[in-house]
Image (tube, rainbow, N blue to C red):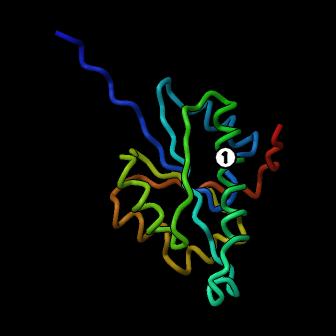
């Protein structure tokens, strides 16, 4: 009879701001157990004018950059990580990610200038109510930006 395997801890990172700076990655690595798995979702956040013109090429490029920085830094720090782009509405982006990735925790990476906007929209509160998972907010603006090799 095979021994039961321990469940791998799974964390969903919502990359509103780049989660991939060295200080944050080191912090994540310091708090991760062996075998932890991370999914980074980078919502394709639309600028005001792009919502009206349906031209989201620049928005997708910014989201892809956030995603690539986050994945590269976390991977370089030994975290098993993969990622995806997400819906422009953050709670929907989380819902879509959780459909395929059963996370144990959600970490939201925000820049300080966006914190009040997300608070006004009730993003974190709505996500807590909808998904029933612990949610941690990390201010990425206080950390140095990532350097991609």
Quarter of the image for the C terminus: give it: top right
Extreme-bottom residue of the structure: 52
Q: Locate residue 3, reporting x and y percent.
A: 24, 13
Please give left or right for residue 149 compared with residue 122 in the image: right
Name which residue lies at 58% across and 32% down.
79
Quarter of the image for the N terminus: give it: top left
Crowding at dot 1, Cα within 10 Å, few <14 / some 14-19 / many 20+, comes out as: many
Extreme-left residue of the structure: 1
- The secondary structure type at the circle numbered 1 is helix
Quadrant location of residue 9?
top left
Q: Locate residue 141, reporting x and y percent.
A: 76, 58
Please give left or right for residue 131 compared with residue 46 in the image: left
Extreme-top residue of the structure: 1
Name which residue lies at 41% across and 52% down.
134
Quadrant location of residue 80?
top right
- Give the vertical position of 40 relative to 51 (above or below): above
Q: Locate residue 113, reporting x and y percent.
A: 72, 71
How many numbered discs? Answer: 1
Q: Locate residue 83, reporting x and y percent.
A: 55, 47
Please give left or right for residue 70 compared with residue 99 in the image: right
Residue picked out by circle 1: 70
Name which residue lies at 57% across and 64% down.
43
């Amino acid at each position: 009879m095979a021994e039961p395997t321990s469940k791998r801890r799974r964390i969903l990172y919502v990359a509103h701001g780049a989660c991939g700076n060295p200080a944050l990655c080191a912090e994540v690595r310091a708090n991760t157990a062996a075998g932890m798995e991370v999914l980074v979702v980078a919502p394709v956040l639309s600028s005001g004018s792009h919502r009206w013109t349906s031209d989201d090429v620049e928005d997708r490029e910014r989201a892809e950059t956030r995603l690539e920085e986050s994945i590269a830094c976390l991977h370089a720090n030994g975290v098993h990580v993969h990622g995806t782009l997400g819906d422009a509405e953050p709670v929907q982006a989380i819902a879509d990610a959780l459909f395929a990735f059963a996370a144990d925790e959600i970490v939201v990476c925000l820049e300080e200038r966006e914190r009040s906007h997300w608070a006004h929209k009730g993003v974190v509160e709505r996500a807590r109510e909808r998904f029933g998972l612990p949610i941690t907010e990390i201010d990425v603006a206080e950390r140095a930006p990532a350097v991609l090799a």
